[in-house]
Every structure is written in C-alpha cells, then in structure tokens.
Image: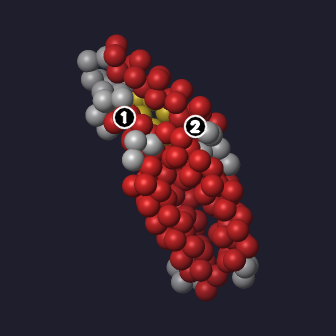
Amino acid sequence: MPTVMKFGGTSVEDERGFERVVNIVKGVYAQEVTLPVVVVSAMSGVTDALLESVDRAATGDPEEARRLLEPHWRRHLTVVRALAVQPSAIEDMLEGARREVAELLQAANVQVMPRPLLQDLIASYGERLSSLLLSDMVRQIGLPD
C-alpha cells in the first residue's frame, strides 16, 4: 500500500517550502517499494484570497477582485522562476489560469452560475497551481509524477 503524504499551504508557501516537500517525497520514495501519493494544498493564503475575490466580484467589483489576487499571482511566478525546469511552459499555464479566474470573476459579477459552484471552481485554482509546480519539481529529480 502506498504512503499518502499531505502538505498544507504553509508547507508550500514559497520556493524553500516547495524544495523541502520535494526532499521529503524523495526520501520516502527511496525507502518505499511503491511511489508515494502526494496531496498538496494551495500556497499559504491563496485559497482565502481566491474566495475573497469571489465575494468582491459578486458585490459588483470584479476589477478590485482581480487586483486582490495580483500579489498571489506574483508569488506563484516567483516560485516558478526559481524552481521550474521549464519556467516558460509553467508561466504560460499560470497566465492561462489568471485569465480563466478573471473570466470567472466577471461571471460572479453578473451571476451567471450559482455562487457556491463558482467559489469551488475558483478556489480549486490554488491547489491546481501548487500541484502543477510540485509535479514539475518531482520530474526534475527523476521521480515519476
């Protein structure tokens, strides 16, 4: 049975955090017959910011909602540039996620879909981006993702 490893947001809050997680995964992989299953949260503070952005957009201010997320997009970009094997490919995915979230925030403003569904959808971007970066880092050291 594989080892399941869960890393919360403070574990992956910056590039040093991601490096620590990769080293832990590498150590477990070296001791196990099976590949560990790794679950990662959004970077520290990202889920709260994403949910707050939905609230701001839903009350009629999608521009402020997008601005609220800018520091978090920059944090992701900093980590990607410091740690990714092919930063341009992940930067492109990050920019795509940024555009998608902006479109979803506009949908929150005009109430195109039920708010709980929209909150879940937007909040998922935090975990998706963390897992994308961690997967890239795991491949860098030769482990299967």
In this rendering, the answer to whether 144 lies above or below 28 is below
Q: What residue do we see at 49% from left, 70% from top? A: 100
Is 1 left, or right, of 9 in this rendering? Answer: left
Q: Secondary structure at mark 1?
A: helix
Q: Amino acid at mark 2?
A: Glu
Question: Which color scheme does this rendered protein use?
Answer: secondary structure
Return the mark for residue 140.
1
- Residue 69: percent from left, percent from top: 66, 62
Q: In the displayed orientation, state which residue is furthest to the left.
A: 33
Callout count: 2
In this rendering, the answer to whether 56 lies above or below 14 is below
Q: What residue do we see at 67% from left, 62% from top? A: 70
Is 43 left, or right, of 4 in this rendering? Answer: right
The residue pinned by badge 2 equals 15
Q: What residue do we see at 46% from left, 29% from top? A: 22
Q: Amino acid at mark 1?
A: Gln
Residues under labels 1 and 2: Cα distance? Answer: 15 Å
